[in-house]
Amino acid sequence: MDNIKKLELVPAEDLLKELKLRTKHPIKDDGTRSPESNPTLREFDEVSIARALKANQKVIYGTDDRLDIFDLSPGPNLDDVDSVVALFNRSDIIDNGNGTSTLQTRNFGTAQNLCPGERFREQPIGAFCSGFLVAPDVIATAGHCVNTSNAANVCFVFGFRMQNATTATTTIENKDIYRGASVIGRQEVSNGPDWALVRLDRPVNNHRVVKFRRAGTIPNGQAVHVIGHPVGLPTKFAGGATVRENQSNAFFIANLDTYGGNSGSPVFNSTTHEVEGILVRGEADFVAQGTCNISLVCPTTGCRGEDCTRTTEFAPLVRVPGSWEARHGLTSAQYQQVFNELAGQGFRLTNVSGYAVGGQDLYAAIWEQREGPAWQARHGLTSAQYQQVFNELAGQGFRLTNVSGYAVGGQDLYAAIWEQREGPAWQARHGLTSTQYQQAFDELARQGFRLTDVSGYAVGNQDLYAALWEKIEN
């Protein structure tokens, strides 16, 4: 212990230099070292120097930059936390029957046989990986964390963090716990890309969707930070890192302070706060010191570094907010399936057209992924059903934005879209013959209405029309 106390007065840079020199200039046959070695340190063995170095450096790369979330000040770094999830096995989450669930955890120090003095030693662990929200119902994580066989048994939990230095949040509202529904895409290459995109059982509407790099490459030396669940601990923020190697097309290497449970963690650009990569591989977490374990010590420029799969590897599978989708030739069942799927991803129907081929009703439609007022859509309605829905929704403040008439088996049917919003006065008609349509057109035009949507269709040998007008405001 006396040696360590004396060594603590020596700069960490000198300790590192001495270790390197001893590696290059081993002990000679006469028990001495080459003269290049630091003469003030010759009396100490490598174990003493390594222990003193740990006292100076504390954790994996350089100083220990990990922070609990309650230590973060309001701002972009804290905002970044909101998109991060902990991955738990479904069996480790107990429903309390009151709208909350309890996370099953263990003591970090006991589980890892940690030596006294290790940071976060008394905190709980339970998560096995980390992840982050890249679309309203899609989580990105490491490919070695989730696959098609286990996705349904994985829960994605928001809010597993320390409230203060001694209290962890392990009772979580069920609205912040999601289950995996399907794997959208996945790769797991030992020295290449390692990622997975998981569709959740429902959209997330109370947490931030991250922005991430879709093209190009992160600059060399760029400052980065990582947020996740090292060794399954409550959420930790770790900054003070930079991009160390940038040659591979699939991943970059950074000196991030991370552990095994950080797999799947988002690696943020500390300047733009866009996600640049997924933490997937790195150095060993712990090394033995006598009968207990300590964190592996690496200098800032030492060891290999942590591999981060580039977000450009999976970007094509994640739709850009504000994007649009179009489908045609869908049967009624197929249309409803696509409708439900896209609505769950934040898409809203903006145009629909129903038509018939060989007595089969088919649908073509356009969706846009954007915010907007509440909306409703229906299809396959008879004239009477359409009028009933029309009246009900109008009474609730919904206005018709799109209508399509079509005929199947000699029966006129209707598909339509409504939005709940204010706007100019409007009029709608359906089932009009050509003469009736022209009459309504002329009458409404004289009253200052303009045609905004029209659908022509045939029932038997009769052409019919459904249309929508809005009043022109001066």
Image (cartoon, rainbow, N blue to C red):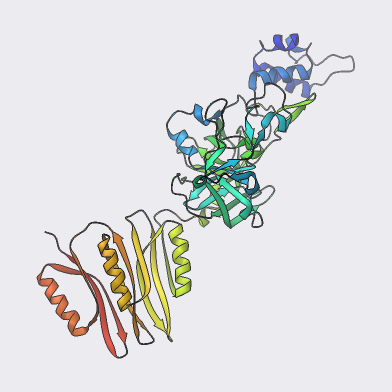
> Tag count in the figure?
0
Residue furthest to the left in view is 446
Drawn side of residue 205 relative to residue 58, left or right: left
Q: Is residue 384 visible?
A: yes
Residue furthest to the right in view is 29
Which residue is rendered at x = 39% and y = 87% of the image? 409
Is 388 in front, or is 25?
388
Which of the 4 image quadrants contains residue 11?
top right
Position of the N terminus, as image quadrant, is top right
Which of the 4 image quadrants contains residue 262?
top right
Which of the 4 image quadrants contains residue 363?
bottom left
Drawn side of residue 60 relative to residue 332, left or right: right
Image coords of residue 221 (percent x, y): 54, 34
Rendered view: 66 above or below 193: above
Image coords of residue 53 (percent x, y): 69, 19
Which residue is rendered at x = 33% and y = 57% of the image? 374
Is 33 in front, or is 1?
1
Which residue is rendered at x = 72% and y = 19% of the image? 51
Rendered view: 298 above or below 126: above
Image coords of residue 99 (percent x, y): 51, 45
Is 36 in front, or is 177?
177
Q: Is residue 214 visible?
A: no
Rendered view: 360 above or below 106: below
